Image (spheres, rainbow, N blue to C red):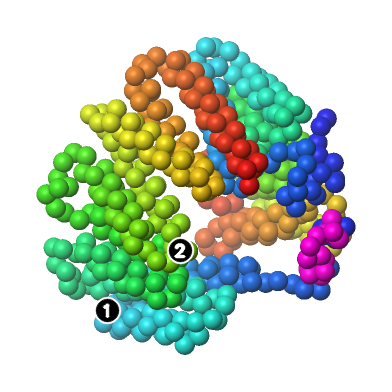
Amino acid sequence: MTTPTIAEERALALRRPGQWRRASIITQIVLFILTAIGIVAFFWLCDLIHLPRGWITAAVSIAVAELLIQRLHFWRTGVESALWIGGLFAFVVSLPSSGKPEAILAFVAASAIAGWRMRNALFGTLATVLVAVYMIVKEWPWLAAGFALAVCLTALVAETRLWQRPSTEFLWEGLLIVMPVVAYVPIKGDVHGEIGVPRCLRRSP
Amino acid sequence: MISYEPELASAPDAARRIAIERREIVPVGRELRALAWCGVMLIATGVGIIIRDHIHDIGPLAIAMAIGVAAAACYGFAVWRPDAKPWADSVVLLGALLISADVAFIEAQWHLLGGEWQRHFLLLAVAHAIAAYVFGSRAVLSLAVAAFAAWMGIEQRSVFQSDIDLAIRAFLCAGSLGIFRAMNRKAEFNPVFDHFATNIAFWGALVLTFNDDTRLVGVLLTLVFAAGSLTYGLRRKLEPFVIYAIVYPLIAVDILIFDLLHEEMLAAFYLVVSTVAAITGLIVLHFRFRRAS
């Protein structure tokens, strides 16, 4: 599987010329949004022509993403990241809905896989946040807060180590910033100060 | 943590950059600026909350005077310590925001401008523009332009009574900003005028595109503006203008085609094709940009 080596990733972070093509942050954001719109449109088209929309959208998106990465050496352009996470999310959305909180775990897996393949710290952080959200929805507020704090402390310890890949460093930084807020949510939970599930995440009886 | 020390050994300013990597030097200017900006926004929000919650306890006159004094103190500090970097700009911005809040509060309380209440936006635009030029603040200039655009958007005159008045207001506003830009003598302010004028002109064209009667004119105008924005962006090597030249026409043409296509399947297919075309165009232009720069 083609991925930038440590040296290439470091060169990309320093904006040095190399075989990989990356875009500026603004262009990445615009391309990510446009690609997401394209994936939604493709998903809609598959639905209209009665094709298995989830499978096909995921397969086409991931195939195009890999083509862009391996042939055109796209990395951090916004397109390949959107294709990976959008394709996997489209697949999860197309699965039969049971209404159970365990559905969140499917999104956790999708985010984690996309984050691992793209070495994208935001997707990795999203996966970790969704695990905590799952625990909150399951009405395990203490476990959610404990999990978030444990991840935060792990990230804090990890930040004392010297990392070679910028993406790994960004993941720890992202977790360190986001997880304390995530830990606060189940503790804040109830407006009366009791520990519990935030009202917006409560399941109806 | 991460260290780029091995890569920086051959850099022109290697000693300083390696010292930063080793944390022997810790530059905090950017962080301080970000914190100062966050602080300004929190204070401005806090002022709004205090006004809302304690208007009857404190009294409107006391509130108006207190905010006015605070705004004057901010500008006074900027005059007294003009080189107090990195927070001087944030203090000026806070002063401008407090003036905005004060003017809005006074207008809401005592209706000094009566039926012409919208003129307070023009008043703010002038006040902020003067402050922006005196203190050289782009953030305050943005407030001035936003206040001017707000005034143009709600001013009631016969020229604005047609169905497409919002679009006309947008074009007039963009044209006025173009004139201000031509008169401007501070080079660092030019991008503020350029971005505001371009976006407001595109919004005007999109308003026409959304209107059933003027859709075609709107699309044509969007394409004309896009050609101008693209040329300007490529000549000046300013990528945001190239992005505008792709994204706005995409929206306008999509609206037009969606209006013409009544078959849902064709619409979905078209959306896939148009989005892929826009992505491809943007990528090609982006990498052309990078090669050129």
Pick the residue in front: B261 or B17: B17
Circle 2 — which element? helix
Amino acid type assigned to the residue bearing label 1 in the image = Pro
Would residue A19 be visible to someone looking at this image? yes
Residue B240 location (% of width, % of height): 51, 46
Side (left or right) of B263 relative to B61: right
Q: Mark 1 belongs to which subunit? A: B
Residue B163 location (% of width, % of height): 18, 39
Amino acid type assigned to the residue bearing label 2 in the image = Ala
Is the magenta region chiefly helix, strand or loop?
helix
Q: Give the range drawn in magenta.
A: B7-21
Q: Which mark is residue A81?
A: none
Circle 1 — which element? helix
Q: Which mark is residue B187?
A: 2
Magenta stretch contains residue A40? no
Can you say whether A50 is above or below B61 in the image?
Answer: above
Side (left or right) of B89 relative to A181: left
Pick the residue in front: A27 or A157: A27
Can you say whether B174 is above or below B109 in the image?
Answer: above
Q: Residue at x 85, y 45 (%)?
A: A6
Residue B189 location (% of width, % of height): 44, 63
Q: Which mark is residue B60?
A: 1
